[in-house]
Amino acid sequence: MKFYFLLVGLFLLSQCVREISGQAKSMESVPDLQNSMYRVVDGVPCVRLLNLSGEIGCANPGRDKVVAPVVRYQTGLDLARPSAILVSLDRMGELFDRHDVTVFFRISKDPGLSKNIGGILVESGTGIPNEFKGFSPDRKFPLAEFSPYQSTNYEWNPRGTGILWNTYTFPIFLLTNDSTPIMKKIAKENEKKTEGHTSNVAEFDLVMQTTKYGTHDSESCLKEGTCLPLGGYRLDMKYGSVWSSLPPIHISSSKQVKPTILTVASMDSGSLFRDKNLGSESPISGLIALLAAVDSLSRVDALGELSKQLVFAVFTGETWGYLGSRRFLLELDLQSEAVRGLDSKLIEMVIEIGSVGRAFNQGTETFFAHTTGVSSATNATLNALKRAEVSLGSQNISVSLASTSNPGIPPSSSMAFVKKNSSTSGFVLEDFDAAFSNKFYHSHLDDPSNINSSSIVAAASLVARTLYILVNENKNIRSSVLDSISINGSLVDEMLSCLLQCDPGLSCELVKKYITPSATCPVHYVGVVLGEPSSTPYIGYVNDVSRFIWNFLADKSSALEKNSRSTCSQDCSNKGEVCIKAETKGICVTSTTRYVPAYSTRLKYGSGVWTVLPPNSSDPMAKIDPVWTESNWDNIGLRVYEVQEASLDRLILLAGIAATVLAYIAIAIARAFITKALKRD
Amino acid sequence: MTVAAGIGYALLALGPSLALFVTVISKKPFLILTVLSSTLLWLVSLIVLSGFWRPFLPLNSAASWPFAVLIITSVAFQEGLRLLFWKVYKRLEDMLDAFADRVSKPRLYPTDKMLIALAGGLGHGAAHAVFFCLSVLTPAFGPATFFADQCPKLPFFLVSSIIALAFATIHTFSMVIAFNGYSDGNKLDQLFVPVVHLVTGMVVRTCCWSYYCNF
């Protein structure tokens, strides 16, 4: 009898399969097993953004995670059930365009596909195929509603598809270069398993608080506290003009304000995917050109003795309705603390450095000046620009007036200036004439390979010399001084590697000289406004790039000043001094560099809550301001694992119960048998 | 694989042992105590073994011989412990018999002795199932399943449960055979148990993977 039972055991064992200890992937613990089963996939999400009338962007449709099998996108794909579609870069336009995946266009060309989209995964490539004509999710005329002219159907961005502004009721993730091959393999395995009992699924966790709480526009979500307004801190810096060979004179900034030449650039870009947002050509090339121009002008003597003032401003939030420039203009009107020392009536001209990274064309760097209108100030600016071009003669740089068949200035911060005050003079320097040269405007593909550092150096040289000419009012300029104004090419290269790459990224020497960055990979998304907006924000709420630019501009503007150089950690006791490099080794320098909060002019912060103000009649742009906010969320993640059919799970439960019941019966029978046998003995 | 499958795997591994416990063991408190102490003893033995082998892990999975050494030493230790277990049982038996004599009650019947041995074996089987199967079963309660490279057709947890079931059965009845062998002095029985233990251990690790898995 005992042998019988033992043999049963052996039989079971020999009938079954092998032990798994010591397999190829050495797993040493249950957490290892868990990690092998549930693989976390790196992905950059597209998140839910809201405005006054509704929402854009992506989110899970409810409070739960979305689980869907991974399927590769092919033309003519027909889905039987909600699936996660893996689509490559070059087919993405086709998927979004032809198949109308938005919630508003249900009567699409392919209802079978749209209905069953559980989620979308976009592949990343290591190289963009040559036949890929470009990809821009923004509209064909970005921010057309802010244009100061009527032709709003002009196509500045011909490759624009507008998918950035659609509402998606499913999650969309952009895979990284590392996770793309993993996903491709999984999709391929799924194709082989069509008749099998298991499938590989992707689990999307993109549950947005606004979905959970049912607040589907900015006003309600701000009231409920399920979202935060887009915005941040942008900077304006006054180029101090004090140093001279005479005993140093320190001019307090509250005294006479001189006529001002304002040079602006912006530092934020947009993308369907929140954290993959480099914006190399638009607008970071312009930002780097501005910083390089400031650097070169900081080495010129005697700028302080002149009758005009140079002010440099870097705006953020421009992608989302010109938040930075509009708030700046409002603060100027209110004469607030943030812009003390500036007078809007004395701003003579506004020069904007737009996209300047792709000017290289058959041996010459070609730029275009898009003027804001015809006036004597604009003419003076153009003359200065021409003179600067001539002085740079040997360097193959050319600048021409933009074509008159253009309806006006391209989408830029200057549009906000002109819309506010139509007599604003100035120009926008761009590397294109009638349409963007950027094939990847406001997309995750606008990376450093899209631009050329020589183009940026050329633009910076032009701007620096033009500003010098303008501030000297085009007289008494010694060509030797003008020719000495040159751009530090290695500084430009360093800034490219710091602001547009992950390695070294923000951990580069240049940035670490000024700040302690919180992340290495730079992201040029405007972000949300944390806490109360003010001109002296809590430094922890200001993002790395803004803090770097503040410190850089303060450092350069103080270069030829008398500085106390006393150590500091936050503020300086001397009037007119600021504490730079506070996060590393703070020193006090003489500079007028300030943060100005950038957020919608229709928002007000009070007692911990944001409220939407009704449009003010004195602010024409307030009526068209969408008031963008970003939903809050708990976690965002993407996992893949293999699931088996529910019927198999039930079968296993049944098998377990059957084994128990059968054993019970067998033991009961055996016991009865044994008892009877013992009684007999 | 969801909660249903997780419960299924747990029942598959320990269901028959549970059935045995409910029908036979639970009627007599002494047997329950025996099961508990036996489980404790064998769990401790497995922990001691894993503690001993920890510095040598992970083993080079390409060669088979490290695993053979692992299994041989573990089986030898456990069989030695089984002998010790029997010696303790003998002492206990003498004490019980002496007590029975004092209160003029009958001594232990052979069936009682077998039941005690069965309880001891059940404890051993349960310890094995808990240590080798239930401890890795937690991920099975989630939505995902897992297939090992060596066995791509059957889920890993299913394999693990079936092996645990087999070992539980083997251990349960090995104890009965061993105790019989020790008390009768039957060399065949005494040798049978360690040999079976060793052979099943080796078979599970080293042999014939593709034959059974790729059906």
Image (cartoon, rainbow, N blue to C red):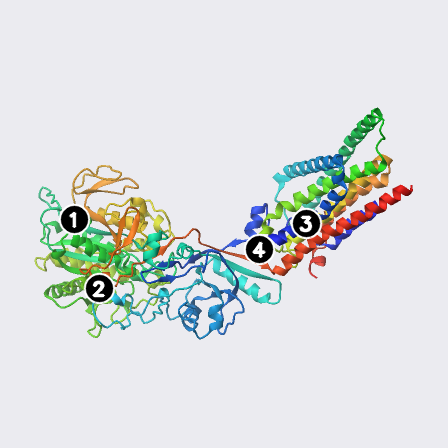
Q: Say which chain tag 1 marks.
A: A
Q: Which residue is mark 1?
A: A340
For residue A406, side relative to residue A204 (left or right): left
Mark in front: 3 vs 2: 3
Q: Is residue A449 above or below residue B137?
A: below
Report the residue marked by disc 4: B144
Q: Give the mark nearest the N terminus, 4 or 3.
A: 3
Cα distance between the residues tagged 3 and 1: 76 Å
Amino acid identity at mark 3: Leu
Between the residue at mark 4 and the residue at mark 3, the CA separation in whole angstroms equals: 19 Å
Q: Is residue A168 above or below residue A585?
A: below
State if disc 1 and disc 3 touch (CB < 8 Å).
no
Q: Secondary structure at mark 2?
A: helix
User: CA–CA distance between discs 2 and 1?
Assistant: 24 Å
Amino acid type, label 2: Met
CA neighbours of label 1 inside 10 A, class few (<14), some (14 to 19), many (20+): some
Amino acid, disc 1: Arg
Q: Position of residue B17 (x, y in %)?
A: 73, 45
Mark found first going from the N terminus, 2 or 1:
1
Which of the numbered marks, if any, corresponds to residue B11?
3
Compute the Cα span from label 1 to label 4.
Answer: 61 Å
Query: What kind of element bears circle 4?
Result: loop
Q: How many marks?
A: 4
Amino acid on which the number 4 mark rests in the picture:
Ala
Label at residue A415: 2
